[in-house]
Amino acid sequence: MPDPRINLKNPVLAGILAFLVPGAGHLYQGRMFKSVIYAVCIWGTYLTGNVMSGWRAVQAPRMSEVSRRIPLTLKFAAQSGVGLPSLYAIYQNQRAAGPANRDVTSISSPMNQPFQGAAELRPELGERIEGTIEGTISLKPETDVFGKSIGGSLKGTFRPKGGEAKPIEWPLEQVVLGRRIQPGLERSVRASVLNTEGRETQGELIGHIPRSILDGFGAPATEADDEELHRKLGKFHELAMVLTWIAGLLNVLATWDAIDGPAYGYGDEAEKALAAQAANGATPAAPAPSTAASATRDGGRPQKVPST
Amino acid sequence: MSFTWYLFPLSAAISLVWTASRYESEAVIIRRSIALTFKILAVMAVILAVLYVLSFRL
């Protein structure tokens, strides 16, 4: 029988809340200390794993893949202990499979985004120049004989290999943005770099702009995405996944506690029993030889000594 | 940063959640979760020592 001091209120509702948001079920029940413990520990573990993996740790298998991709199914089963983010990953599967989720070659309105990447320039006279770029990319819709496309410009700093950084402002054409729904918070960008007059192509640009966390979290990964993640993170990739599994499994305990109360009781039952014995005037005495064996059998609990 | 350092906060988090799911009293939860954390770390230290000895000079 649950301890009367623990008010579970509506246990089913508390369990649902605890499953969806770790700590919410106990907050609803007014068990503030536990709510904070579960929220900090479970969310802390879960978010650490996600941040470590660049928000690519959580992936849900499609319904058709559940029996084919057993490892992914088992991984997601553990992660799904943390309910709301895992449900979102299932929704992301639907979004990613939609016909609109493909490389983008036209946009409806201009956009400015911070950009990081690399460029390879092939000037008419001189050697090929490679280097890294950091700056702001400005994109705008364009229309030419071939139809709609994306153009724009890149303003920032170009650091050639073995050379010094210099400010640049390059016109761009044939910009291709990566798929909107894809794991991670970096969206790929490819473009042709034009010369200063904006007429001749002088090189290629490849890099990334930020992707919204609502588009990047929980998105399904291709094999190429997985390989890139392994290459980038190394053994930290495994650690990131394990942290999200542990968080999911810990939330199973928290959800059970919200529904059924603590497994062993309030925790002060032994102290209360001793206090009750002391209040009744019984003192724990050294057991007589004939009772020593029974005390051992009873696990060493203090025995009531009958008064003579 | 070596990922071994993650072991310490992870052990503490697991101990806290496990103990909190067993008891309700705050004092009992804190006391028992501290003890469990040290037990987990002690067991892992023993396993580390055994593996180190077994892999010596490999």
Image (cartoon, rainbow, N blue to C red):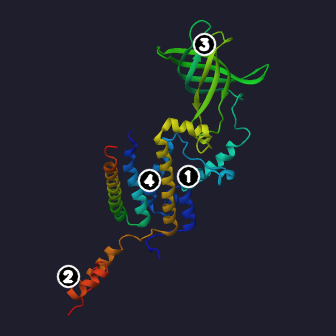
In the image, taking residue A159 as reference, residue B35 lies left or right, namely left
- Residue type (three-letter) at the residue carrying disc 1: Lys
Name the disc covering residue A144, or none: none
* Callout 1: SS: helix
Using the image, name the chain to which the residue with label 3 belongs.
A
Q: Which residue lies furthest to the bottom in this view?
A: A308
Which numbered disc flags the more N-terminal residue, 3 or 2? Answer: 3
How far apart are the alpha carbons under marks 2 and 4? 44 Å
Residue with the mark numbered 1: A75
The residue tagged 3 is: A122
Secondary structure under the numbered disc 3 in the rendered image: loop
Of labels 1 and 3, earlier in sequence is 1
Crowd rating for badge 3 (residues with CA inside 10 Å; few <14, some 14–19, many 20+): some
> Which badge, 2 or 4, is on the more N-terminal residue?
4
Kind of residue at disc 3: Arg
Mark 2 neighbour class, 10 Å CA radius: few under 14, some 14 to 19, many 20 or more: few
Sequence order check, earlier mark of 2 and 1:
1
Q: Label 4: state its secondary structure.
A: helix
Indicate the amino acid at tag 2.
Answer: Ala
Residue at point 48%, 62% (across, down):
A253
Is A180 located above or below residue A163 in the figure? below
